[in-house]
Image: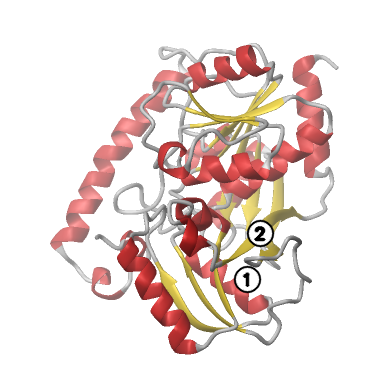
Amino acid sequence: MIDWQRIWNDEDSIRRFSPTRVLLYLSSLLYRLIVDLRNRLYDRQILKSVRLSCPVISVGNITVGGTGKTPCVIRLTRMLQQSGFRCAVISRGYGGKNPQAVNIVSDGNNALLGAESAGDEPLLIARSLPGIPVITGAKRMLTGQAAIERFGSNVLICDDAFQHRQILRDINIVLLDAERPLGNGYLLPRGPLREPKEGLKRADCIILTRAGGTESLHPDVAAIIDRTGIPVFRSDHQFRELMVPGKNHPPEHNILQGKKVCAFCGIARPASFKKLLIEAGSEVMSFMEFPDHYAYDERDLEDLKKYFLKFHADYWITTEKDAMRLEAHPEFLKTVCILRVEMEIKPSVPSFEDFILKRLNAVTGQ
């Protein structure tokens, strides 16, 4: 399996001239031509975007994976739900194998599909948002119409939709990783960029994720913001709770303080998960990384058990996203603790909530 992160980080021998690097660079030039052409066709309305009968909010990014879209979708949807909106989340359902044009992951009351059919992220969203329909499908116009007609939704949240311009969006939220917002500056496959940085001009606001104490902006991002006046919010991912097998209620917040843990995950930015464990005061004895959206098999699970027993750890921990995929192995899942995180958007003027609600009220005429 190709280690794309290593290539994109320009590590080891990839720093030196190599045929692989040249091939990836040439491929990225072709990819850029295609992306630029498509965006120009939409900008000039040669390709038409369809307006649905209710406001649409997109949560996306310009790089591949790992910026925290799922926690943002959950936080945004919960906020709008508490403000009285009838929301639905629509997603392409990356990694899901259900071939239907419209797949009801959750009807708001029950999760109707598993991770294999729905994809791990839509299932995580569905389990995190009781009362909210979650729908997947390749054509967001169809999934959006289904949300409106079947569930009476009056606001749609599109997960990972910044590049999918088939339907018009009333608010485009773009997430950028605070440390490396543009990756190595190259487009796919030479780098993680899905489109050139100039695409940020379509954003209505930017959220810098995992910002921590970061206050400075990447110079290229800052230049675009200065020209457009796009508001910027800062956020971080916070330890919410540790779900321990056999416990009916979340344990105390400092449960990991001074404890030995073994951990594993298959997410885009495993270092962020490990950082949370360390910040919680734990001693990480072993940390096994798998590719994003990884489908664990029995051999993987046996290897993980051996590590846990070898280090005599107090806790064996994975992420909530990984837990969605591990539902296919229920007996194994019963033995693992699940770390739950949430996005915290830092106070600002205007606040993120005020910004979103003001834009929605302008669209709806309220």
Give the answer, above or below, for where 185 lies relative to 290. above
The reply to whether residue 226 is in sight is: no
Quadrant housing the N terminus: bottom left
Q: Position of residue 186 (x, y in %)?
A: 36, 52
- Binning the other alpha carbons within 10 Å of mark 1 as few (below 14), some (14 to 19) or many (20 upward) gives some
Residue at 63% from the left image edge and 82% from the top image edge: 282
Q: Position of residue 202 (x, y in %)?
A: 56, 32
Q: Which residue is mark 1?
A: 276
Q: Position of residue 178 (x, y in %)?
A: 59, 59
Q: Sequence-wise, which precedes: disc 1 or disc 2?
A: 1
The reply to whether residue 143 is in sight is: yes
Assess whether mark 2 and mark 1 are in contact (beta carbons under 8 angstroms): yes
Element class at badge 1: helix
* Display colour scheme: secondary structure
Q: In the displayed structure, does residue 109 sit left or right of residue 162?
A: right
Q: In the displayed structure, does residue 353 sit left or right of residue 59?
A: right
Distance (Cα) linking label 1 and label 2: 9 Å
Q: Position of residue 47 (x, y in %)?
A: 41, 14
Give the answer, above or below, for where 242 lies relative to 261. above
Q: Which residue is mark 2?
A: 341
- Binning the other alpha carbons within 10 Å of mark 2 as few (below 14), some (14 to 19) or many (20 upward) gives some
Amino acid carrying label 1: it is: Leu
Residue at 54% from the left image edge and 68% from the top image edge: 335
Front-most of residues 100 and 40: 100
Q: Disc number at residue 42?
A: none
Quadrant housing the C terminus: top right
Front-most of residues 179 and 353: 353
Q: In the displayed structure, does residue 302 sit left or right of residue 230?
A: left
Residue at 66% from the left image edge and 45% from the top image edge: 128
Q: Quadrant of residue 231?
A: top right
Q: Count the numbered circles shown.
A: 2
